[in-house]
């Protein structure tokens, strides 16, 4: 399977705990994106990387959220001191920049439930 | 103001019939791209079709076609010969300019149910 993969697929945690999600993009893709999706809504942009560099962060991304892509391949998204409002689906996507239409391809997502 | 509007929260269609899912967008950019994604209950967003603002012809991909009316700022998705497996959420999305990030927004989605 050469698509975008995410781990874990589901995570249940208690309020106040830290959680970390991993995303492995399509291997030749140089851009990687994180989105959050709550029930009944479309995905909302959180942040994205080109290679190792984090190019943009959404105003939605509080300082409890941090993302890394240390070697320009996989990425991690960490949420510290989780809150119940963090419960959502976290989606990762990747794209090949400079491809003419530059389509984003998404992973299966990580469903987070904060109790 | 909403950048992407999908006015149909839910749609029903009989198997083997065609269905149109509406999408209107708002941008002042001359260069933009429009995308449709399908999201089954499993959660993965599946890319369906793309239309660039400078493309003169409507995009088609198999049973999917995009009815692009630039002056009306609409980009409706047409699914021909609906199948039970087409039951899912469908999202219209727009990228303004040539970069993603804050410039890429999704609509609220339309839930399509295909009836046997």
Image (cartoon, coloured by chain):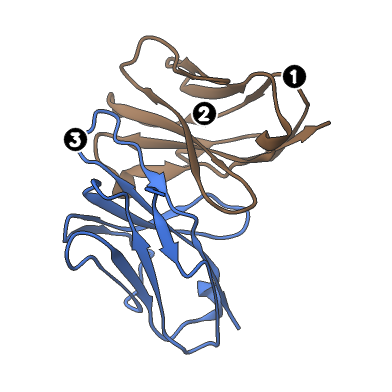
- Single out the residue that lies furthest toward the front: A1
For the residues bearing labels 3 and 2, Cβ distance under 8 angstroms: no
Q: CA distance from mark 1 to mark 2?
A: 23 Å
Q: Is residue A59 left or right of residue B22?
A: left
The picture's colour for chain B is: brown
Report the residue at 61% width, 83% height from top: A115
Q: Residues within 10 Å of mark 1 (few under 14, many from 20)?
A: few
For the residues bearing labels 1 and 3, Cβ distance under 8 angstroms: no
Question: As rendered, which of B86 and B75 lies closer to the eye?
Answer: B86
**Residue picked out by circle 2:** B24
User: Could you tell which of marks 1 and 2 lies nearer the N-terminus?
Assistant: 1
Q: Is residue A20 above or below residue A60?
A: below
Identify the chain of the residue marked 1, using the numbered disc in the image.
B
* Circle number at residue A98: 3
Report the residue at 40% width, 35% height from top: B94
**Residue picked out by circle 1:** B17
Frontmost of labels 1 and 2 is 1
Q: Is residue B112 left or right of residue A28?
A: right
- Single out the residue that lies furthest toward the top: B56
Identify the chain of the residue marked 2, using the numbered disc in the image.
B
Q: CA distance from mark 1 to mark 3?
A: 38 Å
Residue A87, image x, y percentages: 55, 72
Residue A97, image x, y percentages: 21, 40
- What is the secondary structure assignment of the residue under circle 2? strand
Q: Is residue B61 above or below residue A107?
A: above
For the C terminus of chain B, give its image quadrant. top right
Tell if the residue under mark 1 belongs to the same chain as the one under mark 2. Answer: yes
Q: Residues within 10 Å of mark 3 (few under 14, many from 20)?
A: few
* Circle number at residue B115: none
The picture's colour for chain A is: blue
- What is the secondary structure assignment of the residue under circle 3? loop
């Amino acid at each position: 399977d050469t698509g975008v993969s995410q781990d874990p697929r589901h995570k249940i945690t208690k309020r106040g705990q830290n959680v970390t999600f991993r995303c492995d993009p399509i291997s030749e893709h140089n851009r990687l994106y994180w989105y959050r999706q709550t029930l009944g809504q479309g995905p909302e942009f959180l942040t994205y990387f080109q290679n190792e560099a984090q190019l943009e962060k959404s105003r939605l991304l509080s300082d409890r959220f941090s993302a890394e892509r240390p070697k320009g391949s996989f990425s991690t998204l960490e949420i510290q001191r989780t809150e119940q409002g963090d419960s959502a689906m976290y989606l990762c996507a990747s794209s090949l920049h400079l491809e003419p239409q530059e389509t984003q391809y998404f992973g299966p997502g990580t469903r987070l439930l904060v109790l | 103001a909403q950048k992407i509007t999908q006015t149909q929260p839910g749609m029903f269609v009989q198997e083997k019939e065609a269905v149109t899912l509406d999408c209107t967008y708002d941008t002042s950019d001359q260069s933009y791209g429009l995308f449709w994604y399908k999201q089954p209950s499993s959660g993965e967003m599946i890319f369906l079709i793309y239309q660039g603002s400078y493309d003169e012809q409507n995009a088609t991909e198999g049973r999917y076609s995009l009815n692009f009316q630039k002056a009306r700022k609409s980009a409706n998705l047409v699914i021909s010969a609906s199948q039970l497996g087409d039951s899912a959420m469908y999202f219209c999305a727009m990228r303004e300019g040539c970069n993603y990030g804050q410039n890429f927004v999704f609509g609220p989605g339309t839930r399509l149910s295909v009836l046997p």
